[in-house]
Amino acid sequence: MKIHNFSAGPSILPQEVMQQAAAAVQNLDNSGLSLLEISHRSKAFVAVMDEACETAIRLTGLENKGYKALFLQGGASLQFLMVAYNLLENKAGYVNTGTWSSNAIKEAKALGTVVELASSKEQNFNYIPKGFDIPSDLDYVHLTTNNTIFGTQLKTIPETPVPLTADMSSDIFSREWDYSKFDLFYAGAQKNMGPAGTTLVIIKEALLDKVSRHIPSMLKYKTHWEKDSMFNTPPVFAVYTSLLNLRWVEAQGGLKALGAKNAAKASLIYDEIDRNSKFEGFAAVEDRSAMNATFNLVNPDDAEAFDKIWNAAGVSGLKGHRSVGGYRASMYNALSIDSVQVLVDCMQTLEENY
Amino acid sequence: MKIHNFSAGPSILPQEVMQQAAAAVQNLDNSGLSLLEISHRSKAFVAVMDEACETAIRLTGLENKGYKALFLQGGASLQFLMVAYNLLENKAGYVNTGTWSSNAIKEAKALGTVVELASSKEQNFNYIPKGFDIPSDLDYVHLTTNNTIFGTQLKTIPETPVPLTADMSSDIFSREWDYSKFDLFYAGAQKNMGPAGTTLVIIKEALLDKVSRHIPSMLKYKTHWEKDSMFNTPPVFAVYTSLLNLRWVEAQGGLKALGAKNAAKASLIYDEIDRNSKFEGFAAVEDRSAMNATFNLVNPDDAEAFDKIWNAAGVSGLKGHRSVGGYRASMYNALSIDSVQVLVDCMQTLEENY
C-alpha cells in the first residue's frame, strides 16, 4: 500500500532523492567508494559542499548580494544560541509565535536584553501578530516564519529599521518571496531541505563582527564563513542529500513553481476543513500555514472512526502536537497533491458515514 | 579494482554496514518509509537511539556504573567547548599531544585557567608525554587518546586525583581497555563509529552539575542527559548507521577481538617500516598508533615511484597530513589485514625495484 506521509519532520523527501542518496551510500559516482568513507577534503566532497551552498543562494535569489550559505550542525536550537551570541550586544527584539520562538527567546535572554515585540501566546499561538512597533535601537529582530506546531505562517515580511533574522526551519524553499529582506536566516534541514543532521544558515557578511564578547570558535559565524563550512568535518551525508533535494527543487521549476504547488495543496485541505461539518481549523484563517494544516474534530467522539478511515487509506503522521491536539497535516514540498486528496477523501468519508 | 581505503576520516566502514544503511534510506525495515522521512519520536527511531546508546555502553563495559551515552552533533570541536563549559569552574589540566589537543586547550582557555600539564610540541608531537604531575586542585584533566595527524596513541591511562576526560575520536571501540577510568569521553563518529554527523559522548552522572556559570541549553550535558539525546531532532541517519556499525563491532567479538585484529595490522605495517630501507617511521616506537601509521621516505626522490606503485595497487587516502608530510596509513576497525598486506607489498616493490 502506498503511504501518504504527512509527518511534521523529519518528513517526506522526493523518492528520487532517496534513491540517489541510497546509491551514493553504496558507491559514489562510480568511484568504488561510499559517500560515507571519503575525506571531506576530497575533491568530490568539496564540490558537493560548494554546489549545495551555491544552489541555496541561487534558489533564494541572493547571488552577489553579500550573503553566504553555511551548512552547520546542531539544528535550529543551536541557532537560537548562535544568533544571540553573534549579534546581541545590548538589546534584541523577538516576536513570539510559538514553542520555537519561545525557545529562541530563552537562549537569547541569557546573553542580553530581549524585548518581546509581540506575542500570540494568549491565544495559544493561533495567529501571527502584526502591526507592532520595532524600535530602532535594537541590535536585530528575530521572527519564526512558520510555526510547525500551531500551523501559522508569516505572509508579509515586516519592514525593520534594524537587521532582520528568522528561523525558517519549516518553510524554507517552499515559496517565492524576498529573501533579501532578511540579513540572516536559518533552517534545520529535516523538512523542506533534506534529512535531519544539518542546518542551513544564510548570512550577510555585514553581520559577522557585531559584538564585543568572546565567541567560541564553533559558535562563531565568522569561523564557518572563513572556512566555507569546513572548519571541522561536516555532516557529509546530510549535506549531500540536501544537495540532491535542492537540485530537485530547481528541476521542479524552483520556488515559484513549488510555491504554486504548495498553495494548491493548502487550498485543497483548507477548503475541505471549512466545508466539512465534522472539522474546524485551529489557526486564524489569514495566517494559515501552507506547510502545516492544524485542525480538530468538532465532536471528539468521532476520533476513533476518523483514525480508522485514514489509517486504512495509508495516511501517516497525522497526529496533532500535544500543544494543539487534533490533527496536523504537514504538506512539505515533496508531498504530492494526490496525497492531500486522499486525506480530503477520508474527511469526506467520515462526514458521509458518521 | 578493489580500493584499499586508508583514509584518515571520514573513513572506511564495513561493506555490510554501507549496504544496510543504503537499504534503510530506501525502505526502513519494510515499513514502506525511508529512514529519512520518519519522525524522530516514532517508535522505530526511539528504539534505534536506545539500542545505539545501550550498545555503546555495553561495548565499553560501563553498564550500571552511572554513565549514559549521548549522541550529539557538532563533532569533537563542539566537545572542546562543551567540556570546558560544563566542567571548568577554576582550573583544568590539559595534555597537549597535537593539533586537536591544542584546539581543545584554546576553547577552554576562554572559560577559565588552563594548565598545560605536558606537551610534545617541541618535537612536532611525535611522542606521548608521560610521568607528569597532576595537581589535585584541578577541576579535571583532558587527554587525546589517539593523535590522527601525528600517529601517536596513549597506551597507559594515567592515574588522576581529579575527573579524567578524553577525546577518543580516532580510536574509540578499537581496543579493550578500562573505560571506567574516564569520567567523560567523546568521539566524532567518522572513524571507528559511523558516518560523519554525530558525536558520541559518554559521561558520568556525577559530572552534570559541576559549575556555577549559566550554560546554554544546547551546550549543557544535563539537557541531553535528561532528554536521552532527543532535546531536538537528532541526526537520524548518522545515529542509525552508527548503530549498524556498533552491531557489527559486537558481531566481530567486541573490542577484545577487534583490538587483536588492529594490533596484528599495526605489527604488519610497522615491522615493514622498520625493516624496509626505503622508509622510516615518524612517531616514537613505544607510542605508535594502531590506528594511524605515519611514515616517510628516507629519500624523498622516491616519492614519484612509490606513489605510482600504490596508486596502481588500488591504495587510497595515503597522503600524510601537511604537519608531518610523507604518508599516513589509517587502519580503522573496518580495514582488513589484506589491505595492509597490499600496502606492505607496495613498500617492498619500491625497495626491490628502485
Image (cartoon, coloured by chain):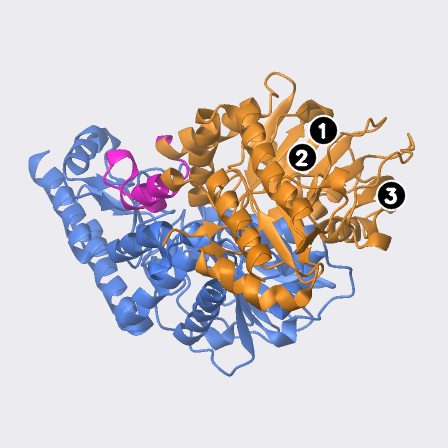
Chain colours: A orange, B blue
* Residue A85 screen position, x and y as percent: 74, 43
At a point 18% along the width and 41% down the height, the residue shown is B278
At a point 42% along the width and 38% down the height, the residue shown is A240
Tag count: 3
Dominant secondary structure (helix, strand or loop) of the stretch shown in magenta? helix
Q: Residues within 10 Å of mark 3 (few under 14, many from 20)?
A: some
* Residue A54 screen position, x and y as percent: 51, 25
What element does badge 3 sit on?
Answer: strand
User: Label 2 is placed on what type of residue?
Assistant: Phe
Residue A148 seen from this side: no
- Give whichever of B99, B200 is nearer the camera: B200
Residue A95 seen from this side: yes
Give the CA distance from mark 1 to mark 2. 7 Å
- Give whichever of B65, B180 is nearer the camera: B65
Quarter of the image that includes the N terminus of chain B: top left
Residue topped by disc 2: A185
